[in-house]
Image (cartoon, helix red, strand yellow):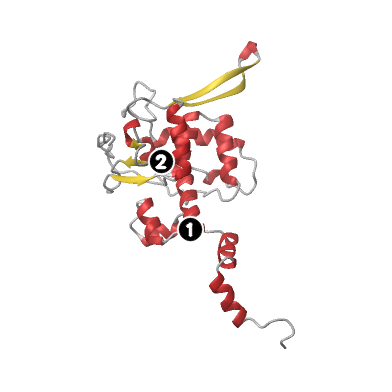
Amino acid sequence: MPRRPAREIPRRLVGKQTVKRKGKADPLLGDSWQEWLGIIKDHGPMWLYAATIISHACCLRITETLMLTAESFDWYRNVVVVPPLKGQEETEKVMPSRAVTLFNDWWRNGGLRVSRMKKQGNRGIVPVEETWTWPAQGYLFPATRKDSKLKRRTKDSVAKQIAKLRKNITNATIKKEKVRSHSARHRSINDMKAAGIDREVGKQYARIRDDGVWAGYGRLSAFQAGTAMHNNHALQMAWVNAIPGPGNL
């Protein structure tokens, strides 16, 4: 059984702060999701690539992902221990089999490594390596700044990287300003809904208590809804009996 990560003391807000509502994050439906992952892989830091995939695969808030440690993963039972956050208790999540294979590969290889070509002054375009290390212990995404208040990266650091990467989005169907750290979680819930996962099962896995909140996450597109209806045999049979056939005037 892995050692449980220490409970973090949340940073308190000083004085009154005005929170500007940004609306729901883009769930990056269809091929948009793979396109976004490709942009991160080609232009962003590898730690962001890893964090985005973990958030999607395990349906985690980005802060939950950033709170994970090497000790959070139990490879014998294929579960990840998610720390308490937003009134939710610590919980164990069974990882998708595909995610287990991928994360285990990252763990065994010590992380991720990708080669890129980058312009560096008088040297011109030279090959560089972008890496992210899966640690032997401690946070998967440790803070790098000496003045950081936490020992791990924060949601703000993710938001800054995403803001830089939006300029690389060329797909007109993607709303650039809506691509945020929460997009991975929205896409994960959309995947569940499109697959017909029972609402209570999905809410439990996503750690969402309220039906209204669940309804607002990862909403199905009209095409996804139509596909689900087309694949529902009982509904199709009902329509056979209800809709007149050709020539029945």
Q: Residues within 10 Å of mark 1 (few under 14, many from 20)?
A: many
Q: Quadrant of the N terminus?
A: top left
What is the x, y in percent for residue 125?
65, 17
Residue with the most extreme top position: 122
Q: Residue 62: which disc?
A: 2
Residue under pointer 1: 193
Q: Quadrant of the C terminus?
A: bottom right
| Residue 61 spot, x, y in % from top left | 39, 44
Q: Is residue 3 visible?
A: yes
Amino acid of disc 2: Ile
The percent position of residue 32, horizontal first and vertical second, equals 59, 46
Mark 2 against mark 1, which lies toward the viewer? Answer: 1
> Quadrant of the rendered structure where residue 6 is?
top left
Residue type at mark 1 is Lys
Q: Does any portion of residue 159 appear in the rendered image?
A: no
* Mark 2: few/some/many CA within 10 Å (<14, 14-19, 20+): many
Residue 77 vertical placement versus 208 (above, below): above
- Measuring from the top left, give residue 239's x and y in whole percent: 59, 77
Closest to the observer, 133 or 19: 133
